[in-house]
């Protein structure tokens, strides 16, 4: 999904964890009354805008306070035993202060240096009991710190402009947007903790009969998120939603030392939307079946040739290699490769493909969309952005940072608490006017194999994630990590599951090779990590047939499987 440091999953976890699952159902809500924090935030905001001034006379021209109130349930189990059972509640404050003006302010890129300290700062913790004095104290200190940093950085920005060459993109630093005022209900989501713990234990128990699956877990997370925001332009927001997920994960080691893993997940907006026991247990059995099959599957050698990316795999593919390259901030950052920066109005995809990012969609064909939100992190309403129309690039994903003649946000400024806002995806949707049923798509794959003289083509049934290198000092290439790959033989032999390959390539070449699509759009839900942290996203795409794709050998561990028999094997005797 991004530059090498960016992954769709949580740091340190297998890439498969990036794409997780949450399910939906009705939420319990309070009446739409203002939360007690909002007037406190407004009062402190007015005071700061009136009184804040540096010794040399610099004042803020914009301040925003954003509060993220998160109540989280986490339950994890392995082999029928609970390994984690935690309920947590935190309330985080982000303070954004801008000095200068809309044209030139303290957020402008300082060329020739690192902006890591500017991009990341720890969000402040607010009291959970709404205590006015304790809350004001935190707001006061956080505002003072942010203001001093903005004053210092504005001086650095101005000095940087004097000593560097003329900017390639002299766009303003901040767009003017109408204020948003919305007071939605404060969301609560009651749940039966004992029942959920029992369900997770039952699901994980299924792995107890599988001694060849060395590590397994079932995790359930429920997160009720409420957001408050006020800014000096007059915006005032209160809204929220739930994120619930069941994730099943298993891993093993093949005889040649290759580590193998598989995962399934379900996403919903509330606990009532989670799948029933039968659905989850079927998913557990599928993970087990696929892992054991992968363990016995042959390694595949590096290959270039035709391939099909199945719908969900195609959605991840587009997210990774296309979506990140059309994020607005990458078009003006001089360290970025700017693949599509000067291609507005030009063909970038086949003429039968269009791409839209629409975070206003809550669901697709009954599946809850993880990338849904009402307002972005800059108080701009979520809105659909038609990025590519009939193959032609029309716009970028835009936050309030203008670029290349695009002066307004389209509601895609996103972040996790503690990070700077940048343009990010929400629900990325791939549409096609050249669709065929999947069986015809498969037949065309075989025809393409024959035309190219290839013994087989590849079918990528599932992809976990990957990364895209977007910065100029690196090759403008991508790597995508498939987890279920089949050889489809041109001579009619049965398809064969294989393992040990990653998809690699460059985006412009890859997109030019798309031949047609299926009529079978499907959804992936996940979490994507990039400069502004980990955020929930979704992708929708049909299966696609590509004329040529390249795969390379995956890195392989050299350790043998465990020497002694697994303790759970004794239960099978």
Image (spheres, rainbow, N blue to C red):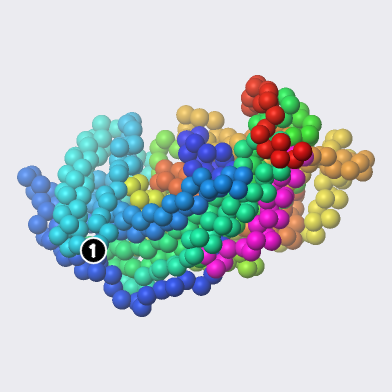
201 or 290: nearer the viewer: 201
| Residue 297 falls in image quadrant | top right
Which SS does the magenta portion mostly show?
A: helix
In the rendered image, the quadrant that contains the N terminus is top right
Say left or right for 177 vs 462. left
x and y percent of residue 536 in the render?
A: 49, 54
In the rendered image, the quadrant that contains the C terminus is top right
Disc 1 crowd rating (10 Å Cα; few below 14, some 14-19, many 20+) is few
| Residue 233 falls in image quadrant | bottom left
Q: Is residue 323 visible in this depiction of the protein?
A: no
x and y percent of residue 2 in the render?
A: 51, 41
| 363 relative to 406, above or below | below
x and y percent of residue 548 in the render?
A: 74, 39
174 or 347: nearer the viewer: 174
Say left or right for 7 vs 305. left
Q: Kindly give the residue lying farthest to the bottom in the view shown.
A: 31
Q: Which stretch appears magenta? A: 271-293
Mark 1, residue position: 130
x and y percent of residue 362 in the render?
A: 53, 67
Is 281 a magenta residue? Answer: yes
319 or 346: nearer the viewer: 319
| 549 relative to 353, above or below | above
- Determine the secondary structure under disc 1: loop
| 466 relative to 399, above or below | above
Residue sitting at x 34%, y 68%: 238
Residue sitting at x 62%, y 38%: 215
| 113 relative to 424, above or below | above
Residue sitting at x 47%, y 29%: 473
Say left or right for 74 vs 285. left
Residue sitting at x 29%, y 32%: 164
């Amino acid at each position: 999904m991004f530059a090498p440091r960016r992954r769709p999953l949580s740091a340190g976890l297998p890439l498969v964890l990036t794409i997780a699952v949450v399910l939906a159902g009705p939420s319990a809500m309070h009446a739409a009354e203002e939360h007690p924090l909002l007037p406190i935030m407004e009062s402190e905001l007015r005071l700061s805008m009136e009184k804040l001034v540096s010794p040399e006379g610099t004042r803020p021209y914009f301040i925003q306070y954003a509060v993220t109130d998160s109540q989280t349930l986490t339950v994890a189990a392995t082999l029928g035993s609970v390994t984690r059972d935690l309920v947590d509640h935190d309330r985080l404050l982000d303070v954004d202060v801008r000095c200068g003006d809309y044209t030139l302010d303290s957020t402008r890129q300082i060329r020739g240096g690192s902006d890591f300290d500017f991009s990341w700062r720890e969000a402040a913790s607010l009291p959970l009991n709404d205590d006015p004095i304790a809350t004001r104290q935190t707001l006061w200190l956080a505002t003072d710190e942010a203001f001093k940093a903005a004053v210092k950085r504005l001086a650095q920005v101005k000095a940087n402009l004097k000593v560097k060459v003329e900017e390639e993109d002299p766009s303003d630093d901040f767009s003017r947007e109408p204020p948003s005022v919305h007071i939605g209900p404060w969301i609560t989501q009651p749940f039966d903790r004992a029942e959920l713990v029992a369900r997770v234990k039952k699901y994980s128990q299924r792995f107890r009969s599988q001694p060849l699956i060395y590590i397994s877990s079932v995790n359930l997370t429920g997160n009720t998120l409420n957001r408050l925001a006020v800014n000096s332009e007059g915006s005032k927001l209160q809204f929220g939603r739930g994120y619930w997920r069941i994730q099943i994960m298993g891993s093993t080691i093949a005889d040649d030392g290759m580590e193998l893993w598989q995962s399934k997940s379900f996403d919903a907006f509330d606990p009532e939307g989670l799948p029933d026991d039968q659905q989850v247990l079927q998913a557990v059995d599928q993970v087990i079946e696929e892992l054991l099959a992968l363990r016995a599957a042959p390694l595949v050698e590096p290959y270039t040739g035709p391939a099909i990316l199945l719908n969900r795999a195609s959605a991840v593919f587009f997210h990774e290699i296309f979506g990140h390259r059309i994020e607005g901030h990458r078009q003006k950052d001089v360290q970025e490769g700017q693949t599509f920066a000067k291609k507005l109005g030009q063909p970038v995809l086949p003429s039968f493909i269009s791409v839209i990012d629409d975070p206003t969609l809550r669901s697709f064909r009954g599946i809850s969309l993880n990338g849904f939100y009402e307002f972005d992190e800059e108080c701009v309403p979520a809105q659909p952005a038609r990025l590519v129309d009939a193959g032609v690039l029309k716009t970028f994903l835009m936050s309030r940072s203008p670029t290349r003649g695009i002066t307004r946000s389209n509601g895609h400024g996103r972040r996790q608490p503690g990070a700077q806002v940048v343009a990010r995806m929400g629900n990325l949707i791939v549409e096609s006017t050249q669709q065929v049923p999947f069986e015809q798509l498969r037949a065309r794959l075989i025809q393409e194999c024959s035309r190219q003289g290839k013994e087989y083509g590849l079918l990528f049934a599932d992809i976990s994630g990957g990364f895209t290198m977007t910065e100029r000092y690196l090759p403008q290439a991508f790597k995508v990590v498939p987890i279920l790959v089949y050889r489809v033989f041109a001579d009619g032999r049965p398809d064969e599951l294989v393992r040990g390959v990653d998809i690699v390539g460059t985006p412009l070449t890859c997109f030019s090779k798309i031949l047609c699509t299926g009529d079978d759009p499907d959804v992936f839900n996940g979490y994507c990590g990039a400069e502004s942290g980990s955020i929930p996203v979704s992708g929708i795409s049909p299966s696609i047939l590509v004329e040529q794709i390249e795969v390379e050998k995956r890195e392989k561990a050299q350790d043998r499987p465990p020497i002694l028999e697994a303790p759970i094997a004794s239960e099978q005797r």
